[in-house]
Image (cartoon, rainbow, N blue to C red):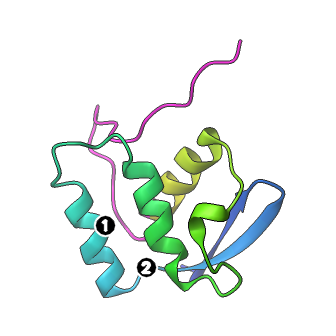
Amino acid sequence: MSKTLKIKLGAKVYDVPKLNVGQLREVTRLFQRDDRTEISFDVVKIAFERVADVENFDEVEAGLDEIVVASAQILEHAGMKRQEGANPLPAPESTG
C-alpha cells in the first residue's frame, strides 16, 4: 500500500501521507465521542496536519461531499474497516 493518498478537495489534489501512530491515536479517539457530527471534518483535518502545502486546513475550499469521501478514503488507507451497517460519517445533502 502506498505511503501517500491522493485526496481531491475543491479544485486541488493533495498528497496526504498515511496516518502516523499519533494521528491514528487521535482518529480512534474521535470514535469514542458521543457527538460525531463533525467526525468527517476532524478525520480529514488530522490527516492534513502533515500535508506540506496546507498551512491552515480550515481555509481549504471543499464541499461536504468531498469531505465525507476524503474521510472514508483516509480511514480505509489507515487500515480501518467500517463496521457492517455502521455509518459514523455524515451523509451529504441531496441536491436533487
- Residue 28, how many percent across, how many down? 24, 65
Q: Are marks 1 and 2 in contact (CB under 8 Å)?
A: yes
Q: CA distance from mark 1 to mark 2?
A: 9 Å
The image shows a total of numbered marks equal to 2
Dominant secondary-structure state across the stretch colored magenta: loop
Bounds of the magenta span?
75-96
* 36 relative position to 60: left or right: left
> Horizontally, is 2 left or right of 78 in the view?
right
Magenta highlight on residue 8: no
Mark 2: which amino acid? Answer: Leu
Can you tell which quarter of the image residue 85 is in? top left
Q: Amino acid at mark 1?
A: Val
Which residue corresponds to the image point at 64% horizontal and 47% vertical from the top-left?
66
Q: Quadrant of residue 1?
A: bottom right
According to the picture, the residue beneath numbered tag 2 turns out to be 19
The crowd level at tag 1 (other Cα within 10 Å; few <14, some 14-19, many 20+) is some
Q: Quick check: can you spot residue 77?
A: no
Residue 7 lies, in percent from the top left, at 67, 64
Q: Residues within 10 Å of mark 2 (few under 14, many from 20)?
A: many
Earlier sequence position, callout 1 versus callout 2: 2
* In the rendered image, the vertical position of residue 46 relative to residue 88, given as above or below: below
In the rendered image, is residue 82 in sight? yes
Q: Position of residue 95 (x, y in %)?
A: 69, 18
